[in-house]
Image (tube, helix red, strand yellow):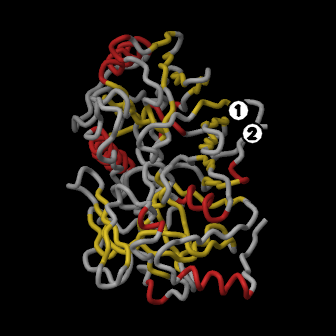
Amino acid sequence: MAFYIKPSSNIFILLVILFFSLSTESEAIEIGGGGITADLINGDSPLSPFYDPSLTQFQRVRNSLSHSLLRHRSIRSNDSKSSVMTSPPESYVTPTAGYYLMKIQVGAPPVEVYGIADTGSDLTWTQCAPCYDCFKQEPPIFDPKKSASYGAVPCKSERCTTLRFENPFCDNSTNNCRYEIYYGGGDGAHSYGDLGTDTFTFDRDMSFPKVAFGCGHDNSGEKSGTFSGIVGLGGGPVSIIRQLKTYYSIDAKISYCLPSRDSNAAGKINFGSNAVVSGPNLKSTPLVKRSYDTFHYVTLEGFSIGNEKLEYSNKAIVKEGNIFIDTGSKFTFLSNDFYAEFISALTKAVEGSPKADPRGDFKVCYEKPKNGKFNTPAITAHFGGGVDLVLSPEGTFVEVDEGVVCLTFLPSDSKDFLVFGNLQQLNYLIGIDLENNKVDFLPTTSDCKIPS
C-alpha cells in the first residue's frame, strides 16, 4: 500500500531545527515500517530506456566480459591474508555491461534517475549540475538548486562521519561534506562531489525525505549515456538498505529477480516487508559477516556437473563467506585451483565440439550445433546450509560469436573474494535478509514468475 509522510506542524518545526544542527544528525522519521517495490530492468534489454539497437548481442557479451574482469581485478587487489582489511574491495562499473537498472525519482519536483542496482556498492550517487567533468547521459542531469527539498550534509553530521571508503572530507569554505569514490583501483571510474540529502521516490507516490546520496560534479569512466549513477545496495551504513532501516524503520532486506535479456517483462526489486521470500521450494543459506560489510557473503562448498560432485579440496580450503552475491558482475569467478577441477569435469560432461573463441577472450568454448540448441550438462552450485541451486542453462553458456558458445565461469587468483555473478542468479527470486542474516533462493520462470 502506498503511503505519504505528512509531518504535523510540530514535527515540521523539529525537522527544521535538526536540519540546521551541525553537531548531530538525528533525522529518523518513524513511519512504522513498510515495503517498497520498484522495476529492475536489464540494461541490455529493449525494455531499457537507453537500449542501443546498434550493438549486437556479441558486442554486449564482450563488453560485459571486460567490465567483469575490471571489476574483479579491483576486488582481487584487496585480497589479503590478513583478517583486517585496510582498504576497500572496490566495485567497478562500466556502461553496456550486463547490469540492471533501477529507476528512482529524486528531489522536488522529482527528476528521474536511472542507477545501476549494485549489491557491491554502498553509496548511491548521481551526476549533478553543475557538472564540471561528467560522462554523457540522456536524461536531464539532476540540479540540486532546482530541488526545494535538497540539503547539504554538514561535515560533523553522522551521515558524513559514517562514510568510510568514500573518502569523506570537509569543504572548509561551506562546512559541507564531500566525497570521492574510485572504482577499479583508482585507474577506472570515479565520482567526486557533495554529500547531500533529498527526497527519494522509489515506487509511484512512496517518498522518503532526507535520503543521503552523492551529488557528483566530477565523474569519469562512463561514456555511453545509459545511466545516471549507482544505487548502493550493499550492507554498509550509507547504503539504501541501511538508510531505510535507520531512518524509516523499514526492515533491512531486499529481494529481486533478474530478468534475462530476452525477457518481455521487467524484474522487480523489493525492500522491507515486500522483500519477504516464501514458497514450498525455498532454500536459505547463511550470510557470513566479514570485516568489510559492503558485500553479501555466503559460503560456496562446491559444484556438481551432471552426476559428478566437486568439493573444494585442500588446495582450495573452504572458508566461510568465500563468495559474494553480485548483481554488478555478469560472470562468476572461481579460485584457480578449483576452476581447473571444474573445467576438467565439465569437459567430460559436455557433448559438443570444442571451438576457439575467434578473439581469444573466452577460454572454454564449443561449436553451436546447426539446430541452434547447445545441450549444457546440469550444473548445481552447493552453498552452506545444504542449499543446492540448479543453475539456468541460459546463464552457464552464452553465444559470443556466430556459432560459438562459451562458459560464463572465469578463473581468479583470489580464494575468498569470489563472485557469484548475475548470469548464475537467473531464474531465482533472491532475498538478501540483513535482519536474519540469510540469503533466500526461490525458483522462478525466466520472466520472474513463481511456478504454481
Contact, mark 2 vs mark 1 (Cβ under 8 Å): yes
Q: Residue at x 56, y 74 (%)?
A: 210
For the N terminus, which image quadrant? bottom right
Amino acid type, callout 1: Leu
- At mark 2, the secondary structure is loop
User: Residue 35's quadrant in the figure?
Assistant: bottom right
Callout 1 crowding tier (Cα within 10 Å): few <14, some 14–19, many ≥20: some
Q: CA distance from mark 2 to mark 1?
A: 6 Å
User: Residue 348's quadrant in the figure?
Assistant: top left
Counting from the top left corner in percent of width and height, residue 392 is at 55, 32
Q: Is residue 333 visible?
A: yes
Would you say 76 lies left or right of 15 here?
A: left
Q: Nearer the viewer, residue 213 or 155?
A: 155
Counting from the top left corner in percent of width and height, residue 106 is at 53, 76
Q: Is residue 100 visible?
A: no
Residue corresponding to mark 2: 278
For the C terminus, which image quadrant? top right
- At mark 1, the secondary structure is loop
Counting from the top left corner in percent of width and height, residue 400 is at 35, 39
Q: Residue at x 73, y 53 (%)?
A: 273
Q: Nearer the viewer, residue 90 or 1?
A: 90
Callout 2 crowding tier (Cα within 10 Å): few <14, some 14–19, many ≥20: few
Image height check: is 315 above or below 24? above
Amino acid type, callout 2: Ser
Label ID, residue 407: none
Q: Residue at x 46, y 27 (%)?
A: 374
Counting from the top left corner in percent of width and height, residue 357 is at 26, 33
Residue corresponding to mark 1: 282
Q: Nearer the viewer, residue 155 or 327?
A: 155
